[in-house]
């Protein structure tokens, strides 16, 4: 638990400015728009919301709520004025069945053991109204294991078939599934190969992975990932450091 709390505190510093988080929001936003299309007063839930920063993003589209297991993340969120946060686990969510139009899971599933991962996906399915959507983001491609894997507590990095199978086995219909951060792939592949040869840092030291780069670099990288987000509005990409999925619960 201490590892997760350290991760959340480091993330809270970076998530407003770091180019990766800016790119992530640019990748996710079109899928949220798609998921709420035609719905009046949609209700959204972020499962494993950390500090609640993404609840703010979801709140621009409807009534948004979030929950997380770690009190440290929730406290950070409340200090930032985020009030629709609860403490709960992704394997036993204390909300009624069929309560939400959209549920999200952003960089959570990859840190769960196999049984908990299956349960968490089943809970997302249960929480959705028929015809509702799940938006899932996970770490991708085993060859990108590096210091960040220690920092994020990765149990696995997914490929397309793994994530599709996990969601479909719970009953979801996959609508869109693409890699993201393809523009970062080459430098990431090289740097993480070197990290593995050196030996991965311990979780405490691996927090260096999430430090915001100097302003000129951060600005350039922000522009790069935002350009990629424009491409992804129309086309999938075959590789990248993350997988992003839009899946639908049948019915409705």
Image (cartoon, rainbow, N blue to C red):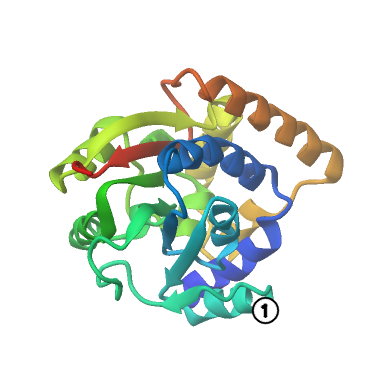
The number of callouts visible is 1
| Residue 17 drawn at (x, y percent) | 74, 51
> On the image, which quarter does residue 9 sit in?
bottom right
Residue 70 lies, with reference to residue 51, above or below; the image says: below
Q: Is residue 124 visible?
A: no
Q: Is residue 68 visible?
A: yes
| Residue 58 drawn at (x, y percent) | 53, 54
Q: Residue at x 56, y 34 (%)?
A: 188
| Residue 2 drawn at (x, y percent) | 48, 78
Residue 145 lies, with reference to residue 83, above or below; the image says: above
Q: Residue at x 43, y 30 (%)?
A: 179
Q: Residue furthest right?
A: 216
Which quadrant of the figure contains the C terminus? Answer: top left
Looking at the picture, tell me which residue is in the foreground, 171 or 155. 171
Instruction: Provide the residue designation for mark 1.
Output: 79
Looking at the picture, tell me which residue is in the foreground, 250 or 192. 250
Q: Callout 1: 10 Å neighbours few (<14), some, many (20+)?
A: few
> On the image, which quarter does residue 87 sit in?
bottom left
Q: Residue at x 31, y 63 (%)?
A: 99
- Horizontal placement of 76 versus 38: left or right? right
- Horizontal placement of 36 versus 185: left or right? left
Q: Residue furthest front?
A: 40
Which quadrant of the figure contains the N terminus? Answer: bottom left
Residue 25 lies, with reference to residue 123, above or below; the image says: above
Q: Residue at x 72, y 36 (%)?
A: 222
- Horizontal placement of 235 versus 220: left or right? left
| Residue 16 drawn at (x, y percent) | 70, 55
Q: In what element is the residue under mark 1? A: helix
């Amino acid at each position: 638990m201490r590892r997760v709390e350290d991760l959340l505190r480091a993330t809270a510093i970076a998530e407003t400015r770091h180019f990766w988080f800016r790119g992530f929001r640019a990748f996710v936003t079109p899928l949220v728009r798609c998921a709420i299309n035609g719905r009046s007063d949609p209700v959204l839930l972020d499962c494993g919301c950390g500090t609640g920063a993404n609840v703010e993003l979801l709140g621009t589209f409807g009534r948004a709520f979030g929950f997380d297991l770690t009190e440290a993340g929730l406290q950070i969120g409340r200090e930032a004025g985020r009030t629709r946060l609860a403490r709960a686990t992704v394997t036993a969510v204390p909300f009624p069945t069929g309560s939400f139009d959209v549920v999200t899971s952003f960089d959570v599933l990859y840190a769960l053991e196999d049984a908990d991962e299956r349960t968490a996906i089943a809970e997302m399915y249960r929480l959705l109204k028929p015809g509702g959507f799940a938006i899932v983001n996970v770490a991708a491609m085993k060859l990108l294991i590096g210091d960040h894997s220690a920092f994020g507590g990765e149990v696995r990095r997914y490929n397309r078939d793994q994530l599709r199978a996990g969601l479909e086995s719970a009953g979801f219909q996959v609508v869109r599934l693409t890699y993201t951060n393809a523009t970062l792939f080459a430098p990431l592949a090289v740097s993480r190969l070197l990290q593995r040869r050196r030996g991965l840092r311990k979780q405490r030291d691996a927090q260096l992975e999430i430090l915001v780069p100097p302003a000129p670099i951060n600005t350039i990288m922000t522009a790069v990932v935002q350009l990629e987000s424009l491409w992804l509005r129309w086309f999938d990409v075959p590789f990248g450091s993350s997988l992003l999925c839009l899946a639908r619960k049948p019915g409705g």
